[in-house]
């Protein structure tokens, strides 16, 4: 990049970009609401904020809000741009995007709850990204008999509290400081904090009464100015991220972006990452909402010839239909090669495509933005979830997506599924899915999607188990106990000890003989331990077993005795065909092993799998 283009100046600072992190329900959305005095929270799915939104706070507004703080004089940045990041733990990726973008973060902690799992996760993330942050110790108004004073600086309002309220405040704050210490973080109430680089500043706040908000705004500006002057020095090289792709009536498909650095002009040639390859287009209009209105809230827009960082901007241009949210926007400079920029623009998409399972087996996932797609993919990858992915898409679910998912019907039916996160499904797509038997799960909260899918998997697994119950043969080796033969021929009734594996009602039992022949004794029809009927006898247990060649699982389930028509000469008899020296084993087959592998892989212990391998040898199964 040419020297002239990257010129920095201390007189020309850009607005710092700030993001909010914290555990669910600590009040992140409410805190933002309180700052901007709108109400986005009510409109959100399950109260959880899932898209990155941005709010620009012009300096006039911050000055007005901080006027009761005498120290808040020297604020040199033009304003503050706050990115609204979600708090659910599965959103590590989206948050890391947020953190990646931002200069400073607010970590919200509920004063009544202290550190919670996602607080710790957020701290680790902030540390990893080396993002400075301050702690908003929120919900102080919930302290016993708190006397609120709307929008007051926190020290003023603290002074007005009764002794016992102050004392509760101090105790809770100290406890939280200890908890932070346990995470190797020094912290201090911001007005006592001598070295803001070494200890994290804590600002007590209430998002309901607005107490502490002036302090929060002041500190955000002060810290970014003091600690990151160089980073905040305006650089003319464009750094810009697409937050959302939206169709707006009268404007067509637009993109909402955060311009972190540089200037955008009407008429600039830009490149963005698209579902069907890079999109090269020209900025038709640069729009901003009216100050103090969040980008997502409907309203009229202001047009601009050019806009300078940092800002949340809506861009209209042709051909943005397939643009992908969460990717970078590039401006093609005068001497720059469009082809190189196109390649650069597609890198983000390439990285998510790398998540497709090599075996080609897995569910299809679809989300509204690259950030949410990444969050969903990240979630599906976690060890206790572990769902393979065979296809990825961004935007609404169309017929072609159903066709792609339907390929799985032949290979693994339960994966012929689309997990659609925060996107619409067209009626034609739904119809086709119904026709072909492709499942679509939609939700706007990731873990709900997961819950639905796992419930479905469980159902299909149970269904399959029911269908294959006759063929699932569990491994066991039994030894007949001395003097415990109660009936010598069909139904054979003997007392046995389970030497290995487990005996289960329905298991076909046989006696392997030395010459490679097997004497089949029928299936286990019933088991009794100490006169109590049981379904399973475990290794080491002694059990009375009835084995009958006329027994089927069907007859067991329906209490029907299927009469056995068999000549006496075919009946296997204790004493004639087998004896105390013979072991009784479950008669496994190639098919039964496959059924167990398919449906009971995790239920059987490694010892039991070893036994299956041993029996496989006895029965000479390949
Ligand atoms: N009393 C009190 N309640 C608060 C305060 N801040 C938030 N709340 C309440 O706490 C609940 C959660 O607030 P949100 O702003 O949705 O919390 P959040 O952190 O954005 O939650 P997620 O988006 O679910 O992660 C809501 O019922 C709020 O009204 C506060 O300062 N005082």
Image (cartoon, rainbow, N blue to C red):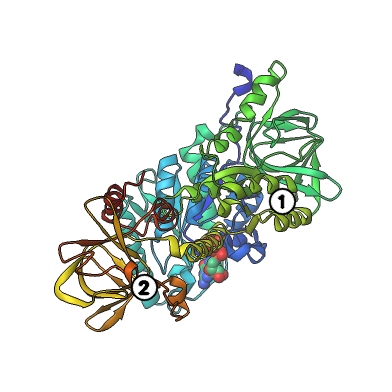
Q: Residue 546, how many percent across, how many down?
A: 30, 75
Specify few, some or many for label 2: CA neighbours under 10 Å numbering under 14, 14-19, or 20 or more: few
> Circle 2 sits in a helix, a strand or a loop, which is it?
helix
Q: Is residue 543 left or right of residue 245?
A: left
Q: Is residue 70 visible?
A: no
Which one is in front, 325 or 362? 362
Instruction: Point out the residue furthest to the left here.
Output: 482
Image region (quadrant) for ligand 1:
bottom right
Which one is in front, 333 or 195? 333
Quarter of the image for the C terminus: give it.
Answer: top left
Say whether disc 2 or disc 1 marks the residue closer to the N-terminus.
2
> Circle 1 sits in a helix, a strand or a loop, which is it?
loop
Please report contact status of discs 2 and 1: CB closer than 8 Å, yes or no: no
Give the residue number, with chain letter if any, for mark 1. Answer: 291
Q: Name above or below for residue 395 compared with residue 486.
A: above
Q: Name above or below for residue 294 compared with residue 99.
A: below
């Amino acid at each position: 990049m040419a020297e002239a283009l990257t010129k920095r100046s201390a007189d020309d600072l850009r607005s710092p970009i700030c993001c909010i992190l914290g555990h669910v329900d600590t009040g992140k959305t409410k805190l933002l609401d309180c700052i901007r005095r709108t109400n986005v929270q009510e409109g959100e799915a399950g109260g959880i904020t899932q898209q990155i939104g941005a709010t620009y706070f012009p300096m006039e507004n911050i000055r007005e809000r901080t006027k009761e703080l005498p120290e808040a004089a020297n604020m040199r940045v033009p304003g503050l741009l706050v990115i609204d990041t979600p708090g659910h733990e599965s959103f590590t990726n989206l948050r890391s995007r947020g953190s990646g973008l931002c200069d400073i973060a607010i970590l919200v902690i509920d004063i009544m709850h202290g550190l919670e799992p996602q607080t710790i996760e957020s701290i680790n993330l902030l540390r990893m990204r080396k993002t400075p942050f301050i702690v908003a110790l929120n919900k102080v108004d919930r302290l016993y008999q708190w006397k609120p004073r709307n929008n007051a600086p926190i020290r003023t309002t603290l002074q007005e509290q009764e002794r016992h309220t102050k004392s509760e405040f101090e105790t809770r704050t100290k406890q939280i400081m200890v908890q932070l210490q346990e995470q190797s973080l020094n912290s201090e109430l911001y007005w006592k904090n001598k070295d803001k680089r070494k200890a994290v500043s804590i600002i007590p706040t209430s998002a309901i009464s607005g107490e502490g908000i002036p302090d929060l705004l002041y500190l955000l500006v002060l810290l970014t100015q003091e600690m990151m002057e160089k980073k905040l020095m305006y650089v003319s090289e464009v750094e810009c991220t697409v937050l959302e792709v939206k169709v707006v009536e009268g404007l067509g498909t637009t993109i909402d972006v955060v311009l972190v650095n540089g200037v955008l002009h009407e008429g600039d040639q830009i490149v963005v990452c698209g579902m069907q390859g890079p999109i090269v287009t020209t900025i038709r209009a640069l729009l901003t909402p009216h100050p103090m209105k969040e980008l997502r809230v409907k309203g009229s827009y202001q047009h601009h010839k050019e806009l300078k960082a940092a800002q949340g901007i809506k861009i209209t241009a042709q051909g943005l239909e397939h643009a992908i949210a969460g990717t970078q926007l590039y401006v093609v400079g005068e001497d720059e090669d469009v082809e190189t920029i196109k390649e650069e623009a597609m890198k983000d998409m390439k990285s998510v495509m790398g998540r497709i399972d090599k075996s080609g087996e897995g569910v299809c996932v679809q989300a509204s933005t690259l950030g949410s797609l990444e969050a969903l993919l990240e979630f599906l990858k976690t060890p206790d979830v572990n769902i393979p992915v065979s296809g990825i898409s961004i935007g609404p679910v169309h017929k072609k997506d159903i066709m792609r998912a339907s390929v799985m019907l032949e290979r693994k039916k339960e994966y012929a599924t689309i997990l659609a996160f925060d996107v619409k499904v067209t009626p034609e797509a739904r119809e086709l899915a119904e026709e072909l038997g492709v499942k679509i799960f939609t939700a706007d909260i990731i873990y709900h999607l997961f819950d639905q899918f796992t419930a479905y998997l469980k159902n299909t697994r149970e269904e399959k188990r029911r269908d294959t119950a006759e063929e699932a043969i569990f491994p066991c080796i039994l030894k007949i106990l001395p003097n415990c033969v109660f009936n010598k021929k069909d139904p054979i009734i003997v007392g046995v000890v389970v030497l290995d594996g487990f005996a289960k009602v329905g298991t076909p039992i046989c006696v392997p003989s030395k010459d490679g022949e097997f004497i089949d004794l029928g299936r286990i029809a019933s088991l009794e331990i100490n006169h109590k009927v049981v379904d399973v006898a475990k290794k080491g247990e002694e059990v009375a077993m009835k084995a009958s060649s006329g027994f089927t699982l069907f007859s067991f389930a329906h209490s029907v005795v299927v009469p056995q028509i068999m000549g006496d000469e075919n009946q296997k008899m204790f004493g004639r065909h087998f004896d105390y020296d013979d072991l009784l084993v479950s008669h496994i087959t190639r098919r039964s092993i496959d059924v167990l592998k398919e449906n009971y892989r995790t239920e059987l212990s490694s010892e039991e799998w070893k036994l299956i391998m041993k029996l496989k040898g006895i029965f000479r199964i390949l």
